[in-house]
Image (tube, rainbow, N blue to C red):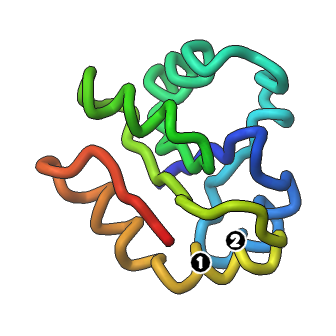
Amino acid sequence: MKLLYDENLSPKLVHRLADIFPNARHVDRVGLGEKQDFEIWEYAKEYGFTIISKDSDFHEKTVLSGYPPKIVWIKRGNCSVSQVENILRKHQSDIINLHQNNDLSFLILY
């Protein structure tokens, strides 16, 4: 499973969560920093990534267009890198289920 962290999330998450999500990347590290959402969407679709974001736009696009890519929307206001890390660790099995289940296109985490 390949995760792509959106620019509204810290690049530190790649290393902090490498033990459970070893194939994760950050948009800044793949040349997509400050790109438009549709460019990130197309990259994720082409290369098989699930997008992790705090941006509701990706969720809305999934509702309208379906997947791929699949979306994990962290529906939280300002929070620390540690808080985001804890949310993703807590929901690791839900993220894996999203990836494996062809009936699901997004996951909302609080």
Residue 46, compared with residue 27, is above or below; it is above
Are the two marked residues, 2 and 1, in contact with CB atoms closer than 8 angstroms? yes
Query: Which residue, given by chain and number where applicable, does mark 1 sit on?
Result: 87
Quick one: SS at disc 2? helix
User: Residue 95's x, y, as percent?
Assistant: 41, 66
User: Residue 110's x, y, as percent?
Assistant: 50, 71
* Rendered image quadrant of residue 84: bottom right
Q: Residue at x 85, y 52 (%)?
A: 11
Instruction: For label 2, count other residues whose C-alpha is less than 10 Å away and answer few (under 14), some (14-19) or many (20+).
Output: many
Left or right position of 84 against 73 = right
Image mark for residue 84: 2
Q: Disc 2 residue type?
A: Val
Residue 101, compared with residue 62, is above or below; it is below
User: Residue 1's x, y, as percent?
Assistant: 46, 55
Front in this rendered view, residue 97 or 22: 97
Front in this rendered view, residue 77 or 38: 77
Quick one: SS at disc 1? helix
